[in-house]
Amino acid sequence: MPRRPGVYQMLGPGDEILYVGKASDLKSRVSSYFRSTGLTPKTQSLVKRIARVQFTITNSETEALLLEQNLIKKFRPPYNILLRDDKSYPYIFISTRDEYPAIRFHRGSQRKLGRYFGPFPGSSAVRDSLQLMQKVFKLRTCEDSVFNNRSRPCLQYQIKRCTAPCVDLIEAEDYQRDLEHAIMFLEGRSRTLMEDLQQQMETASEELAFERAAVLRDQLISLQRVQEQQFVDGTGGDADVLAAEIRPGGGCVHVLFVRGGRILGSRTYYPQLSVEHTQAELLSAFIPQFYLGNSGREIPRELLLSHLPEDGDVIESALSESLGRRLPLNSPQRGDKVQWLKLAITNAQENLAAYLAGKDNMLQRFVMLQEAMGLDELPKRVECFDISHSHGEATVASCVVFNQQGANKSAYRRFNIEDVNAGDDYAAMHQALQRRYGRLTREGESLPDILLVDGGKGQMTQAREVLAELGIESMQLLGVAKGPTRKPGMETLWLEGDDQPLILDRASPALHLIQQIRDEAHRFAITGHRQRRDKARRTSTLEGIAGVGPKRRQALYRHFGGIQGVKRASLAELRKVAGINQQLAQDIYDHLHPGGVETQHES
């Protein structure tokens, strides 16, 4: 291989890409994988699977880094550290082409003409900031179509969150001044802004413009409160603060977003780690994937790192080349920036501890469930069904799925139950199970180890009948019946084939897992039932009648004052409505009174 910079790809027997790496000297770097001693477990595992190696020469190590990240994002090699989050971040957008610019939430490509402030770590941070901006500066947030067609102020004006520029209740000059103050705030120039407001308030007071002075005073007070709420408020600057933490079982990177000297928020990422890496190695793999490419992320003025990567100069060069300006990577030792870094490190440590504890706790619960049920093997997948309805209306069955990592929400399913007697939970359960496992059996999909049924022996009987019809014998059935007081911890558990209930201690992790899964199935079923019921109730009772369109429905509602008046109306009264003839009146009456006998003929 050449002693040139470039990218190498390790390929498996089927030409699948196992690993992508970069090197300043391809021959030296690739040779290091095949030495006889000193290899990590990851490298040993990788080398055993390598069938061939291919490489691409580049002009520099910086170009190699850019190519490496493109290949990693495209092929997702199993032996690379993979970053799973590629969503774009939300921004605050202010248009510059309008006389009265609006301030709005924005996510996606930045093609519109205007100013973008951010990125923010999540939509809630943007909405909180917008709400604050409305309270302090009273800028409009409405769409242009609404703004251009207002004839009187909207509710936002009434609650003192807008100055109603749509109906000219504020001069363009005054609105522009408020907009400039808002921009100063978003840019982090809070101290300058407060001094400016203080001076304007005093000037307005001297000119006896007391209403204007009062508005400025309120803005000043609000901004002072915001300043008091900032945990860390430096002298300014835009930076992302990245702290890496690694423990047995996983690692994380916590990113703190600082804009204009203010902490806007943070986010924690859990990259896929194939072996134990150092924090510096984790950041070395994380930073290029996070910032390079078309992911919609803004690269700030500076990156503050808990650990400096060994190839930090290459990463810095690649980021600077992509940005068109120098982007320093620093690990500060003093000043306000150290406080930001300490905060990021603390968050990384706490988030990773909680993440691993939750993972270990779920696995422990599965182990305890195996012991409680006397299973030969540790269950990998549990499914639970529940039925929800309101006196038989809009019956919905839910299916939730749990594995050893917790809830697998992408595998959740709901079933709208049809053609069963209202309130017949047994028939509803039978239909849901038949549809679920009939499809899985036909398509050859994997089946759960445990089928958890919310109910007693009756529901379990339905489950066993369905499984027998489908020829499924591999699933262990477990019924969960609410106790006489319906309180948590008082459930009665029924194992298939046992005449006596399974009794677990109220502190048992296995019981806690069963309760968690059962409650999640209950929540998911109720949510689906309410959505279906509300949709049905939003549908007019008259919509199923041929010949009764929107105009005739409105005519009926206006004539009788609503659907209840239509239901009480006689045939003769229905015929008095414009557009309703004798036959249509009869159809409406028959639809609203099934089994009714009133019929009216022409005399």
Image (cartoon, rainbow, N blue to C red):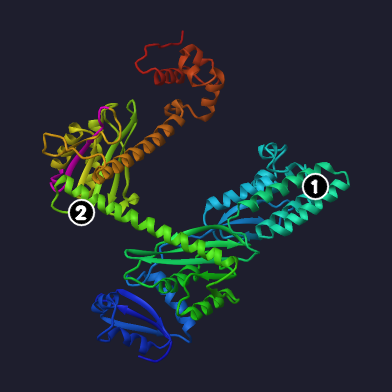
Residue located at (47% from left, 16% from top):
582
Residue 435 in which image quadrant: top left
Percent of width and height locating residue 592:
41, 20
Mark 2: amino acid: Gly
Which residue is farthest top?
A: 603
Residue 57 in which image quadrant: bottom left
Measured in 3D between alpha carbons, the distance from the residue under mark 1 to the one under mark 2, in whole angstroms, is: 69 Å
Residue numbers of the magenta segment: 470-484
Tell me if residue 544 comes above or below residue 582 in the rendering: below
Residue located at (56% from left, 18% from top):
559
Mark 1: amino acid: Glu
- Mark 1 and mark 2 in contact? Answer it, CB < 8 Å: no
Residue 96 in sight: no
Which residue is disc 1 drawn over?
171
Tell me if residue 537 comes above or below residue 295 in the rendering: above
Q: Name the residue nearer the viewer: 576 or 596.
A: 596
Which residue is disc 2 drawn over?
444
Question: With 462 as the anchor, is 414 left or right in this view?
Answer: right
Tell me if residue 293 comes above or below residue 463 in the rendering: below
